[in-house]
Image (cartoon, rainbow, N blue to C red):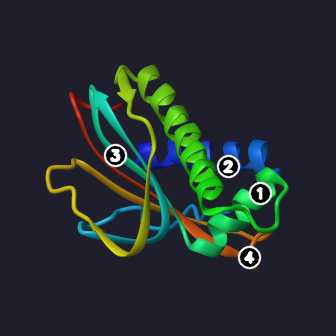
Amino acid sequence: MHIVSGFLRAAVREVFSTMLGIEVKCDENQDDTAEPPVLISGVSGSISLTGKMIGTVFLNFSVPMANAAAGKILGDDNPAASDVNDVVGELTNMITGNLKSKMADKGFNCALSIPTILRGQDVSVNAKDAQISLRNVFTVPAICGGAEFSVECFAKLEGPLS
């Protein structure tokens, strides 16, 4: 497992525990390598990183999973699409902010963009120059009958990571 995947997995667990009060699971033995292009579908939040770490982090939910997560946070069984977008953007921001902090501790200071929300099916993401190309899949037993979501990270580092 790549060290960045370890940071992302810990961030996802913390954010989902704090914000949704639920446990997420990730197979620690899964291959975290993502060969571009990667297809994402549903509702995705993305945040770009600039500085000593340059790249993008995507938080990718199916539409039912995004609606269920937003509904849990907002206390609304039928949240509006704009509210779902806001929740997905904020979750993406919290997870990526946690990654930013961990990378800064390793000497890779960076700044974050504001979240962007993508909706669609089979959106192709191709980060050709990324040194780091990762995909981590999580299961949420408490939502949508054990639905899965993923976090992708495509990045380039200024210097070695230890």
Q: Are marks 1 and 2 in contact (CB under 8 Å)?
A: yes
- How far apart marks 4 and 1 lie (CA) works out to 13 Å
Mark 2 Cα shell of 10 Å, populated few (<14), some (14-19), many (≥20):
some
Rendered residue at 36%/21% (across/down) = 109
Mark whose residue sits in front, 2 or 3: 3
Q: Which residue is mark 3?
A: 56
- How far apart marks 1 and 2 lie (CA) works out to 7 Å
Q: Which residue is mark 2?
A: 13
Element type at marker 1?
A: loop
Q: Are marks 2 and 3 in contact (CB under 8 Å)?
A: no
Mark 3 vs 4, N-terminal side:
3
Q: Are marks 2 and 4 in contact (CB under 8 Å)?
A: no
Mark 1 vs 3, N-terminal side:
1
Residue 74 in percent (x, y) is at 79, 51
Element type at marker 2?
A: helix
Mark whose residue sits in front, 2 or 4: 4
Of the residues shown, which amino acid type is indicated by label 4? Answer: Cys
Of the residues shown, which amino acid type is indicated by label 1? Answer: Glu
Q: Which mark is residue 144?
A: 4
Q: Name the image quarter holding residue 156.
A: top left
Of the residues shown, which amino acid type is indicated by label 3? Answer: Thr
Rendered residue at 77%/60% (across/down) = 71
Rendered residue at 24%/66% (across/down) = 36
- How far apart marks 2 and 3 lie (CA) works out to 20 Å
Element type at marker 4?
A: loop
Residue 29 in percent (x, y) is at 53, 65
Q: Which residue is mark 1?
A: 23
Q: Identify whether 93 is placed above or below 22.
A: above
Mark 1 vs 2, N-terminal side:
2
Position of 40 with respect to 60 (left or right) is left
